[in-house]
Amino acid sequence: MQMEEKQALDAFGALSQETRLQMVRALVIAGPDGMAAGAVGEAVGASSSSASFHLSHLERAGLVQSRRAARSIIYSANHESLSGLVAFLMRDCCQGHPEVCAPAAATDCCSPVAVVEAIDG
Amino acid sequence: MQMEEKQALDAFGALSQETRLQMVRALVIAGPDGMAAGAVGEAVGASSSSASFHLSHLERAGLVQSRRAARSIIYSANHESLSGLVAFLMRDCCQGHPEVCAPAAATDCCSPVAVVEAIDG
DNA sequence: TCAATATCTCAACGATCATTGAAATAAAGG
DNA sequence: CCTTTATTTCAATGATCGTTGAGATATTGA
């Protein structure tokens, strides 16, 4: 369940590109239903070729997954790897210094309250 | 206090390189006292030239800061930007779906309990 | 089967990146 | 002032990245 360094490096690399970061955003918002490759490309203003390239990149990095539905290929965010990345970063940037990213952990939708609620169901 | 997309892109780019990721790790562990450039380079097995290049890169990305102390230049992790990045990623990857990164928020040193403790002092 | 739609693959190009080693700069101490 | 130590800067090189447009592949419906 722990994200390895290599995975994290790939994930950071994948997210270090504007088009891809926006794609991940769009896919997270889209939720489990995902979006067709074309729709993702359109959402971020990329050509079909470019969209395909970046979506493949994201998939190789494990941040998204795809399935075919008729003519379309539906991409969706991989929540597990995304949260794994957050966890990796927290572990890395906390490293025995909880005060470091405590403020981050208190963020918006993932505030302690929201976390407890989400965990308790 | 909110991390902009551009900053986040730079930060992800900075962390997508093995040497730099290890440098950040070493500097986070070192804490506020930081480490001399040479020590960082040695810790990650980089030549002095390479170390300088990567440390500058990290500094440009805002993830670390430097100060001169006698002959040495001391680098230290920038906790604010590091936690800002975690927060950005959480906001991005949660986007109205708290369950997404709730598991991440429950991580180790930043578990809800640790968070509350750190916030309450 | 044919045409239309959706996506991917490929090669080519310019741009950015990482590494190297040599030279420049800065500070300390004799 | 000269030497040593610590670090940065620079130019050159090869490697990787992102974009483009053309063409290949897969699916659907007439």
Image (cartoon, coloured by chain):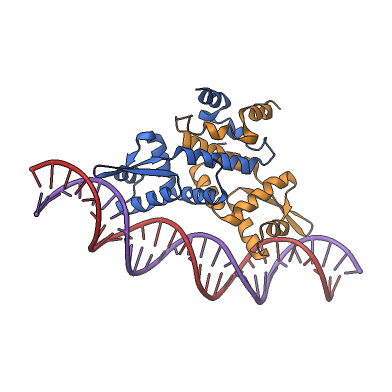
Chain colours: A blue, B orange, C purple, D red
Residue at the spot x=48%, y=38% of the render? A80
Residue B94 position in % (x across, y down): 47, 33
Does residue B11 sit above or below B49 in this rendering?
above
On screen, residue A40 above or below A6: above
x and y percent of residue B29 in the render? Answer: 70, 46
| Quadrant where the N terminus of chain A is found in the figure | top right
- Identified at 64% across, 50% down, the residue is B24
- Residue B11 in sight from this viewpoint: yes
Instruction: Between residue B95 and residue A9, name the one nearer to us.
Output: A9
Image quadrant assignment for residue B32 = top right
Looking at the image, residue A78 sits to the left or right of residue A107; the answer is left
Task: State the image quarter where residue B55 is shown.
Answer: bottom right
Apparent side of residue C12 relative to residue C5 in the rendered image (left or right): right
> Would you say C2 lies left or right of A30 here?
left
Viewer-nearest residue: A102 or B3: A102
Q: Position of residue D19 (x, y in %)?
A: 36, 57
A69 vs D22, nearest the viewer: A69
Residue A106 in the image: x percent, y percent? Answer: 58, 30
User: Can you see residue B10?
Assistant: no
The image quarter containing residue D25 is: bottom left
Horizontal arrangement in the rendering, residue C15 relative to residue B111 (left or right):
left
The residue that appears at 34% across and 34% down in the rendered structure is A33
